[in-house]
Image (cartoon, coloured by chain):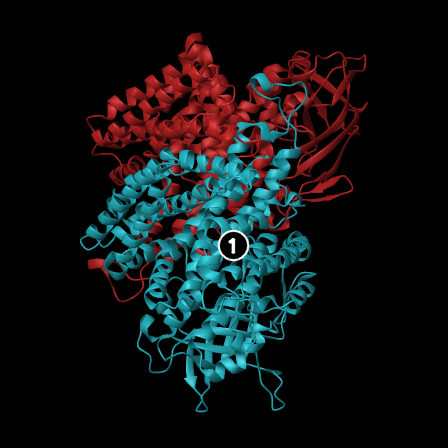
Chain colours: A red, B cyan
Amino acid sequence: MPTYTAPLREYAFLLEHVLDYSGAVASLPGYEDATPVLVDAVLNEGARLAEKELAPLNRSGDEEACVWENGQVRTPKGFKGAYALYRDSGWPALTASQKYGGQGLPHVVGLILREMVCAANMAFGTYAGLSQGAINAITAHGSEDLKQRFLPPLIDGRWTGTMCLTEPHCGSDLGLLKTRAEPAGDGSYRVTGTKIFVTGGEHDLSENIVHLVLARLPDAPAGIKGISLFAVPKSLQAQDKTWSVRNLVECSGIEHKMGIRASATASLVFDGATGWLIGEPNRGMKAMFTMMNTARLGVSVQAVALAEAALQCARTYALERRQGRGMGAAAVASPVPIISHADVRRNLLVGKSFVDGARALWLWAGIQLDRQHKHPDLAVRSECEDFLALLTPVLKAFFSDRSFQATNAAVQVFGGHGYIRETGVEQFVRDGRIIPLYEGTNGIQALDLVSRKITLNEGRTVASFFALVKEEISGMSELRPEFARELQTSLENLRSATDFIRAGAEADPHLNGAAGHDYLQLFGLVAMGFAWAKIVRAALSLGEGGDQKLASEKLKVANFFFTRVLPEAEHFSRTVKTGSGPLMAFVEDEF
Amino acid sequence: MPTYTAPLREYAFLLEHVLDYSGAVASLPGYEDATPVLVDAVLNEGARLAEKELAPLNRSGDEEACVWENGQVRTPKGFKGAYALYRDSGWPALTASQKYGGQGLPHVVGLILREMVCAANMAFGTYAGLSQGAINAITAHGSEDLKQRFLPPLIDGRWTGTMCLTEPHCGSDLGLLKTRAEPAGDGSYRVTGTKIFVTGGEHDLSENIVHLVLARLPDAPAGIKGISLFAVPKSLQAQDKTWSVRNLVECSGIEHKMGIRASATASLVFDGATGWLIGEPNRGMKAMFTMMNTARLGVSVQAVALAEAALQCARTYALERRQGRGMGAAAVASPVPIISHADVRRNLLVGKSFVDGARALWLWAGIQLDRQHKHPDLAVRSECEDFLALLTPVLKAFFSDRSFQATNAAVQVFGGHGYIRETGVEQFVRDGRIIPLYEGTNGIQALDLVSRKITLNEGRTVASFFALVKEEISGMSELRPEFARELQTSLENLRSATDFIRAGAEADPHLNGAAGHDYLQLFGLVAMGFAWAKIVRAALSLGEGGDQKLASEKLKVANFFFTRVLPEAEHFSRTVKTGSGPLMAFVEDEF
């Protein structure tokens, strides 16, 4: 069975040496107390939770799965206890506003906790993750009254939250949604409709569940512009102030899924359930996107988490399992650990070059999130917000695709043993397969990137990001000229692909859809190059007192990335330019 | 739930127009009766079996899985009846020698049946596939006495066969195996040892099971050169000639797997079990490779089968599911089938460009197999054998990788619904994940290709294959110059990569392992280009009386292949040449 060791050494190196946490985050007003020493202590506690409490429940949770019975959902054995511990240790409050009982720590710290939790037990992590989204949406858009009532129990973890978007007939196209909300006259609304794919929509972990539900008001315009957001608790407040009256929402079943089987994916029937409007009428999509963007950044972190967990498994196995002799001069009589074989190393490095680079990149993005919220200079805030908007679809889609590649490479290290459930490594493949699908499919992310994000601020945001990449190239050009050259070529290819799409999209309405996937892959590779350049510079500047072993390791992984991974950018830069013809020439029955 | 429709139109087009079945196979001595008309009738029957009997058991088989109890294995509900029908209809006998009760039809026809069976129900297909391997190995290497006793019941399907290679401590490295066989003095042997991962090693479908077991004779040399092959039946013959005496082999359990859950993967304990030598002492690997090579070609067919089945699901869903509006001039008020969206088309074409090209390629390989066995000219036989030897690792590894990509692309078409077991499409991902792992991991295939196959006959075989590709390029160069140019570039890249590896392997013992994976991908892309060139030429020469709709479709898929898939060859041609440095520079604890 897989064990998990939180990569605390990695977080420390990245925060301290690669991303200047002290200067970039701990110096922001409100984060003065979040010193590196405090963060280190918090992460040590989080590591203990993940390693000792959550990881041991990962396999059994998958085997047992959630069970639905008469509208109730039972989580697998041990989950209730683990959640109670998680709650009592104050983890749900980590980054929430102090005004409502939170600890007010930086978001980037919350995201590191998320990585550890999901690496240890992704299904468990989904419950916590959705609550975080609900907290963020209510904090950003809720009325003061709503905040007073809903935030404290969400933040102390007695309650959890959900996000209710999808209906049986509508997923990617939310404009089609039918759930309706009618004003009750007392400031509340009666919500009626059916929602599916609600993560944590029903379970036995918390006292109450706040559903954040997209629905239409009676006079709402058709389509996406007529959607509002409501908070609909599973239980309502009784006369005695306890939340003990069942609301008119029922769980009609849960899905049987390929993976994250310990995460309850519920169908909910709202039948005149009482709810309260969050934010303004018909502006629900805006409020939902506050939640969704955090959620998308969160799922990119999940993608890294699963790849890390699978890599740890594969590394352990590759050091233990003995097959074959050494090669050439290293040949010996008795079998060697398979980590000696070049192709096994290649599989491990597919994982490691992804995990190390992607972690640096999402940490960088997490820091932008904190700076967006806390930086005193409004121009900086707004720039951070725009960078995040640009990178969110890239991180979500590119990371989920590459994480899936990494978990599969880990299975490959095990040979036939990787296919056996008992070994545990195949679970990471199944659990991770959801990531390219949920929180907006990767196809939707690609469309978002090419149709909205690269044109943001008339293209100034993407140009600013390219300038940041260029800076990293310059910073690396004397240290590692061959890496710098490769990244420079890739960046030029990305620029040119960007121009191609912006120039062609008006004349060809299908270009965005046709080129989006490959463009996003190209963008993702360059963004990873940006992160790797930062790592290379940091590793080389560690100095004599620094961890030379770590520096040596990072430079070798960087070499793999720049010579065997990044060159794929060239391929995507070519295919982007094939346009929509090869796809749209087909009539429907020719597929 | 997925339904399956056998692609009979595709087989007919490929056999008749692309691969000249009549000239290449039906004209061989011994196959005179296997006319296109007969083959067509056989395939129609096979399609009925797959569609009506096997496909309906695919989902339930996965849900129920095999159950082990006290040494017995129970297959899921319906499997026994389906196997009885399969047996009684004479399918196990299809390609077997007429001398022992077979129908003596061409192997390529047997492989088409295999594709249909596995597309409908891969788990069911594994039982049938392994029997075929056992028949082939005994036919090629068994004594006449062994053939007389074992072939008739295997061929009429009363018995099934297995392949027992792996032991707990050895998989890829068979030289380590410990199972031993001691002569009993009466011409038989006593076999003792533990085998794992035995597909169909125990079940309730047939009266008896013949295990083909690799074991060591008492005086055998160490390593791979001291391995012999034995036939060890589950039940032995009693005085009354019935096979009713239990042999000393026990099933100690079955594996719980990620997929093909209705296929019993058994652990077998041989405790002085009675068996008979197949072929010569210490030449077991040679005999096993007869079986293994057929098996590897068989699993490439499985890879295509799963991609076809998943593609059919995704296509149906994409035509039914409505989300979003059309683009540009085609924009309408009500939601359109998602097949209108460019990125959905891309996902479908990832599948279709693989399935159509790969099917043409394996059919071509299957035809080489028949010509190897039946062609009157020994030189032609030997050339066919060499081409097969060269292409077998490419087909096994490249097809299994790309099939996995295709089944995942099919899931992506479904969005979140693809993750739900009920939809059925995720099963193809889980079932297909075994293919890169079994019958020699894809890493082993890559090593085989670069260290043994490209040097076969001092490199003359690979040169002859390149000449065949070159011929197809010439044949296409006036018809579709842009396709021809792309294939020419890829072929040149492959040639150059081949020279690089052959030149460098001696000085760098790790080069083969380091470059093998990417070289195999490059080779696979060029081989697919070879197949697509044949399809393009056939589609263009269909003439006015031909199926113009099919021709138009194939040319459009070809366009996707040559513009968006084949260009990846360029990438691999670069990475092959990075050598082993980026992998071997690591010390073991740096991963």
Query: Which element is circle 1 on?
Result: helix
**Nearer-the-camera pick, B270 or A445:** A445
Res. A67 image quadrant: top right
Residue extending farthest top: A378
**Nearer-the-camera pick, A290 or A20:** A290
What residue is rendered at 27% in x and 59% in y?
A326
Mark 1 surroundings within 10 Å by alpha-carbon count, few (fewer than 14), some (14 through 19), many (20 or more): many
In the rendering, at what x and y percent does residue B40 appear? 59, 57
Q: How many callouts does the rendering have?
A: 1
What residue is rendered at 39% in x and 43% in y?
B529
In the rendering, at what x and y percent does residue A467 appear? 33, 17
**Nearer-the-camera pick, B545 or A449:** B545
Residue under numbered circle 1: B302
Residue extending farthest left: B507
In this image, B507 relative to B425: left or right? left
Task: Using the image, determine if residue B181 lies above or below residue A384.
Answer: below
Task: Using the image, determine if residue B174 lies above or below residue B4.
Answer: below
Q: Do we see residue A384 in this rendering?
A: no
What residue is rendered at 19% in x and 26% in y?
A478
In this image, A575 relative to A264: left or right? left
Res. A136 image quadrant: top right
In this image, A552 relative to A525: left or right? left
In the rendering, at what x and y percent does residue A21 appear? 37, 24
Task: Using the image, determine if residue A336 lies above or below residue A33.
Answer: below
**Mark 1 residue type:** Gln
In the rendering, at what x and y percent does residue A185 appear? 81, 12
Q: Do we see residue A78 in this rendering?
A: yes
Q: What chain does badge 1 belong to?
A: B
Q: Specify the quadrant that holds the C terminus of chain A.
A: top right
